[in-house]
Image (cartoon, grey):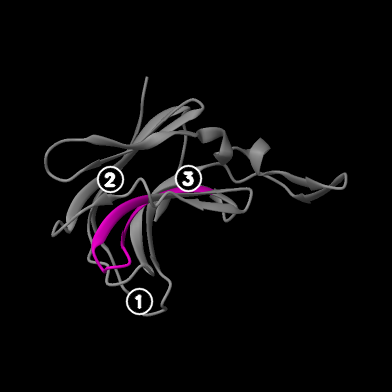
C-alpha cells in the first residue's frame, strides 16, 4: 500500500511486525517511482537465518544492496521504519523501541522524479516518466509462499 508524495519536504513512518525465514522474505517501507527507480528499507534474513535490517535501491534498473550496512535485529520482530524527504535528500531511519536512529547515508531523492525516470536510448524515448513518487509499505516473498508482514499503522506528513 502506498500514497503519492505531495510535497518536497515530507516524512513517512510505518510500524510493522515481521519474522523472515529466509533471505527471500523481505518487508519494509519504500520510496518508489516505478520498477526501475526506488529505495527500500526492509527486514530480511541473513545467510544464517537471523533477522537483519537492510537497504536496497534501484536506479534506472540497476539494483544495489548494501549488505555491509545491515543492522542485526536479534529477537526483535516489531519495529518502526521511517523516511524523510527534504528536497533532493532522502534519509531512512528506524526505531527498535529506544528512539529513532538514522539508517545509511543520505540518498538522492531525484531518482524518484519524472525527469530521472525518462529513458532515452539512441535518441529515442524508450520510457516516459509521469507517475510521480510514492511512499509506502512493501512486503515481498520471492519464494511465492505468501509470507506476510503485519503493518499496524502508517503515517505520511508534509513538512514546512
Camera-nearest label, 3 or 2: 2
Marks 3/2: CA–CA distance: 16 Å
- Which residue appears at 27% of the width and 56% of the height? 52
Magenta residues, start to end: 38-54
Front residue (pair 160, 50): 50
Q: Earlier in the sequence, mark 1 or mark 3?
A: 3
Residue 45 part of the magenta-drawn span: yes
Label 3: few (<14), some (14–19) or many (≥20) C-alpha neighbours in 10 Å: some
Label 1: few (<14), some (14–19) or many (≥20) C-alpha neighbours in 10 Å: few
Q: Residue tagged by mark 3?
A: 134
Marks 1/3: CA–CA distance: 24 Å
Residue 1 part of the magenta-drawn span: no
In the image: residue 69, left or right of residue 65? left
- Which residue appears at 17% of the width and 55% of the height? 78
Q: Residue tagged by mark 1?
A: 146
Element at badge 3? Answer: strand
Q: Which mark is residue 81?
A: 2
Element at badge 2? Answer: strand
What secondary structure predominates along the stretch shown in magenta? Answer: strand
Amino acid at each position: 500500500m502506498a500514497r503519492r508524495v505531495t510535497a518536497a519536504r515530507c516524512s513517512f513512518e510505518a510500524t510493522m511486525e515481521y519474522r523472515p525465514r529466509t533471505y527471500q522474505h523481505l518487508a519494509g517501507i519504500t520510496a518508489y517511482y516505478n520498477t526501475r527507480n526506488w529505495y527500500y528499507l526492509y527486514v530480511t534474513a541473513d545467510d544464517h537465518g537471523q533477522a537483519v535490517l537492510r537497504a536496497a535501491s534501484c536506479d534506472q534498473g540497476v539494483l544495489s544492496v548494501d549488505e555491509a550496512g545491515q543492522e542485526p535485529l536479534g529477537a526483535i520482530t516489531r519495529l518502526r521504519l521511517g523516511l524523510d524527504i527534504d528536497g533532493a535528500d532522502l534519509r531512512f531511519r528506524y526505531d527498535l523501541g529506544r528512539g529513532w536512529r538514522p539508517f545509511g547515508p543520505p540518498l538522492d531523492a531525484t531518482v524518484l522524479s519524472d525527469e530521472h525516470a525518462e529513458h532515452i536510448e539512441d535518441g529515442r524515448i524508450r520510457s516516459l516518466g509521469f507517475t510521480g513518487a510514492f511512499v509506502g509499505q512493501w512486503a515481498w516473498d520471492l519464494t511465492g509462499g505468501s509470507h506476510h508482514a503485519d503493518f499496524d499503522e502508517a503515517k505520511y506528513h508534509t513538512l514546512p
